[in-house]
Every structure is written in structure tokens, then in C-alpha cells.
Image: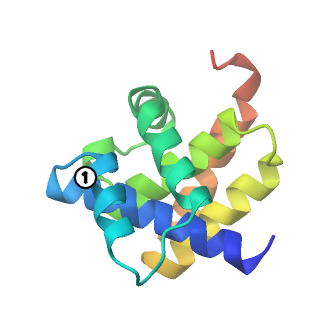
């Protein structure tokens, strides 16, 4: 998986994070970021952030169901958004193998979050993957 894709995923998480923290729409964040030249926002980042946002309610329901001992509200905002991205890619993006979707989310967690986050992200997304065939997509 290319470094450019990882960077685009990280930027998508940053868009989702900013949207949540500032209480503004993903579209507003994308528009604002387009107006800035640095760092550039690419099509993959925009598409991923929009796709996650469109399915956010369903994704949050699944994360709440499969996060053992954690509520969505208790998760750090950055982890919640990394999980949303990973869950979207795992469950709805058929172009990305399951293992890659999880590995990429774990990689973003290593870059953006705490030392415990990669294992948490990996565990929760792995539970989703194990149940993928039974989840109504």
C-alpha cells in the first residue's frame, strides 16, 4: 500500500475529526481545506471522508455493538474517527482487502493516536471482520 494512500487516509481522518470537534459538516471542512493550498486535499481523501460521513450512523451503531467495554462516547475522538474510516473500508469498500483495511487503520492510529490505540483499533475492526457476513450492509 502506497505512502500516498496512507497519507490520504490520515487526512480523511483529520477531516472527520475536525468536523466532529468543530461541530461543522464534513462538506464544510472539505471546502475550507480546498481553499488552503497546504496541505493539499485530494480526491481519495474527499471521497473517503464523504463515504464515512454518509454511513456514519450505521458505522457508529456497529462500533457501539462490537466495542467490548467501551461506549462510543468514551473513545478518544481521533480513535473514533479512525475506527469509522476502517469500518467503512472493511465493510463497504470492496476494492480493499479486509486485512489491508485493518492494517491501514492501525497504521493511521500509530501515527495519530496513543500507544494503546493500534491494538484497540485492530481488535475492534477484527471483530467486525469476523462478523462481516452477518452484518446487514
Tell me: 80 left or right of 77: right
Residue 34, placed above or below residue 30: below
Q: Position of residue 87 (x, y in %)?
A: 58, 43
Residue 76 visible somewhere in the drawing: no
The residue lying furthest to the bottom in this view is 38
> x, y (%) of residue 29?
30, 58
Let me know if residue 5 appears in the view. yes
Q: Position of residue 61 (x, y in %)?
A: 42, 27
Nearer to us in this view, 116 or 62? 62
Quarter holding the N terminus is bottom right
Q: Is residue 28 left or right of residue 4?
A: left
Total tally of numbered discs in the picture = 1
| Residue toward you, 100 or 15 | 15
Q: Is residue 55 above or below residue 127?
A: above
Colour mode? rainbow
Q: Nearer the viewer, residue 33 or 135?
A: 33
Quarter the C terminus occupies? top right
Q: Residue at x 54, y 60 (%)?
A: 45
Residue extending furthest toward the left: 23
Q: Is residue 61 left or right of residue 73?
A: right
Q: Secondary structure at mark 1?
A: helix
Residue 107 falls in image quadrant = bottom right
Disc 1 designates what residue? 20
**Residue drawn 58% across and 64% down?**
9
Residue under the point 48% across and 58% down: 82
Residue count near mark 1 (Cα–Cα under 10 Å), binned few <14, some 14–19, many ≥20: some
- Residue 21 placed where, x, y %? 20, 58
- x 72%, y 28%: residue: 132
Amino acid at each position: 500500500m502506497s505512502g500516498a494512500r496512507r497519507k490520504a487516509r490520515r487526512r480523511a481522518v483529520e477531516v472527520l475529526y475536525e468536523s466532529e470537534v468543530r461541530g461543522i459538516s464534513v462538506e464544510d471542512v472539505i471546502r475550507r481545506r480546498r481553499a488552503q493550498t497546504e496541505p493539499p486535499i485530494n480526491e481519495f481523501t474527499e471521497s473517503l471522508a464523504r463515504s464515512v460521513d454518509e454511513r456514519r450512523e450505521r458505522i457508529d451503531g456497529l462500533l457501539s455493538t462490537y466495542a467490548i467495554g467501551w461506549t462510543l462516547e468514551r473513545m478518544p475522538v481521533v480513535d473514533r474517527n479512525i475506527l469509522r474510516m476502517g469500518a467503512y473500508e472493511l465493510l463497504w469498500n470492496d476494492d480493499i482487502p479486509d486485512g489491508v483495511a485493518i492494517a491501514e487503520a492501525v497504521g493511521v492510529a500509530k501515527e495519530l493516536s496513543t500507544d494503546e490505540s493500534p491494538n484497540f483499533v485492530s481488535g475492534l475492526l477484527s471483530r467486525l471482520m469476523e462478523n462481516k457476513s452477518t452484518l446487514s450492509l
